[in-house]
């Protein structure tokens, strides 16, 4: 049986009967929408799904690679227990200044350790500090050519049974469009997806959520 095609009307119905976006998150999403790079922000549905994952795996320690204006970090931090902690990594003071403002208003800023530094530097420093197998969840949503390197470090830092979520794995449909064969980002995503398809260190699922979300559970 062929999968159901989700058109705009059915998508809006799904949102109407399942999505519950708090006012603060809606304001952050609306403010970010004014930025020409707003497509970098996850959708409200994806945020709600990620929060559900945090509850399901009982996450306490998480890592985020690529913060942007802080929507994904905020939904995850709100889902963490009072003593939960997140290490959030980005290189933009401009974007993360918006994130910090909303984190403070939500009362979760104490849970988030924001590090403005290259992601590989942050991940390698955690590994060097003996943090292997210590994290429950890693969200990767940053520069595409580095996805494979971020993923390998995340696997080291993740506990068995922990979860990696990787955004933009369908890359606006470009992964199957020959017109983008020479695009470095598209080629990187294609190679990364193929790498994970044969990785026997994880249980894998790719979901057609927004721009594609891959979940990899460490065995």
Image (cartoon, helix red, strand yellow):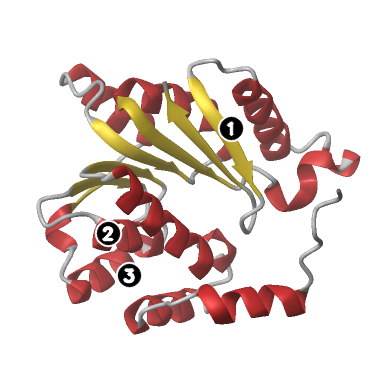
Position of 96 compared to 193: left or right? left
Closer-to-camera residue (167/67): 167
Residue 98 is tagged as 3
Do the residues bearing badges 2 and 1 touch, measured as CB atoms within 8 Å? no
Whether residue 37 is situated above or below residue 163 in the rendered picture: below
Q: Residue at x 21, y 73 (%)?
A: 106
Instruction: Give the residue at mark 1.
Output: 145
Q: CA distance from mark 3 to mark 2?
A: 20 Å
Instruction: Give the residue at mark 2.
Output: 79
Q: Percent from the top left, x then y, of residue 89? A: 32, 45
Q: CA distance from mark 1 to mark 3?
A: 26 Å
Q: Percent from the top left, x then y, of residue 27? A: 39, 82
Q: Can you say which quadrant of the picture contains the C terminus?
A: top left
**In the rendered structure, which disc, 2 or 1, sits on the residue that comes first in sequence?**
2
Position of 123 compared to 176: left or right? left
Q: Quadrant of residue 136?
A: top left
Q: Residue at x 28, y 42 (%)?
A: 62
Q: Percent from the top left, x then y, of residue 187? A: 72, 32
Position of 4 compared to 50: left or right? right
**In the rendered structure, which disc, 1 or 3, sits on the residue that comes first in sequence?**
3
Q: Percent from the top left, x then y, of residue 114? A: 23, 50
Whether residue 142 is situated above or below residue 97 in the rendered picture: above
Q: Secondary structure at mark 2?
A: helix
Whether residue 31 is situated above or below residue 205 in the rendered picture: below
Q: Residues within 10 Å of mark 1 (few under 14, many from 20)?
A: some
Q: CA distance from mark 2 to mark 1?
A: 30 Å
Residue 15 is tagged as none
Q: Residue at x 45, y 75 (%)?
A: 29
- Would you say residue 43 is visible in this rendering? no
Q: Secondary structure at mark 3?
A: helix
């Amino acid at each position: 049986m062929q999968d159901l095609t989700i058109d705009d009307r059915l998508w809006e119905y799904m949102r109407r009967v399942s999505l519950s976006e708090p006012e603060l998150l809606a304001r952050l999403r609306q403010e970010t929408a004014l930025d020409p790079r707003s497509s970098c922000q996850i959708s409200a549905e994806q945020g709600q799904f990620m929060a559900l994952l945090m509850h399901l795996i009982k996450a306490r320690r998480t890592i985020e690679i690529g913060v942007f204006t802080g929507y994904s970090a905020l939904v995850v931090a709100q889902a963490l227990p009072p003593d939960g902690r997140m290490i959030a990594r980005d290189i933009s003071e401009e974007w993360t200044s918006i994130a910090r403002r909303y984190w403070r208003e939500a009362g979760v800023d104490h849970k988030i350790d924001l590090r403005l530094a290259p992601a590989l530097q942050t991940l390698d420093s955690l590994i060097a500090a003996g943090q292997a197998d210590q994290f429950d969840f890693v969200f990767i949503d940053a520069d595409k050519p580095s996805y494979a390197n971020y993923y390998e470090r995340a696997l080291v830092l993740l506990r068995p049974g922990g979860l990696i979520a990787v955004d933009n794995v369908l890359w606006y449909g470009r992964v199957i469009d020959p017109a983008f064969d020479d695009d470095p980002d598209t080629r990187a995503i294609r190679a990364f997806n193929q790498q994970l398809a044969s990785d026997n260190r994880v249980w894998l699922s790719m979901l057609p959520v927004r721009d594609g979300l891959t979940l990899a559970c460490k065995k």
